[in-house]
Image (cartoon, helix red, strand yellow):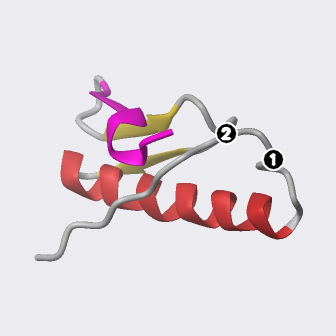
Amino acid sequence: MNLNDAIEYEQEEDGRWLAEVMELSGVMAYGATMDEAVARVEALALRVLAEQLENGETAGRPFTVSFAAA
């Protein structure tokens, strides 16, 4: 899984943005802007992936995570 390609986002009727990683159950976050929602869901996805790695839950499931420096 490439985290950058796995994020889906949309703007809600109330103006908030929702970002979600469909491949990771329950990994979604709201933000006032698209960038804020994406940043929050990236942080949450990394926490979930780290926990899965610690618990050996990623066996047989290749994924990559890339970071961009500002």
Sort mark 2 into few (<14), some (14-19) or many (20+) by Cα contacts within 10 Å.
Answer: few
**Residue at label 1?**
59
| Residue 11 place in picture, x, y as percent | 26, 29
Element marked by disc 2:
loop
Q: Answer yes or no: do the residues labelled 1 and 2 have beta carbons within 8 Å?
A: no
Disc on res. 33:
none
- Distance Cα–Cα, label 1 vs label 2: 20 Å
Classify residue 24 by image quadrant.
top right
Residue 8, relative to residue 58: is it above or below? Answer: above
Residue at screen point 33% across, 60% down:
39
What residue is at 89 percent from the left and 64 percent from the top? 55
Residue at numbered disc 2: 26
Residue 33 appears in the picture as rendered? no
* Residue furthest right as drawn: 55
Query: Is residue 21 a member of the stretch shown in magenta?
Result: no
As shown in the figure, which amino acid type bears the numbered disc 2? Gly
Is the C terminus in the top left, top right, bottom left or bottom right quadrant? bottom left
Q: Give the structural element (helix, strand or loop) at label 1.
A: loop
- The residue range painted magenta reads 1-12
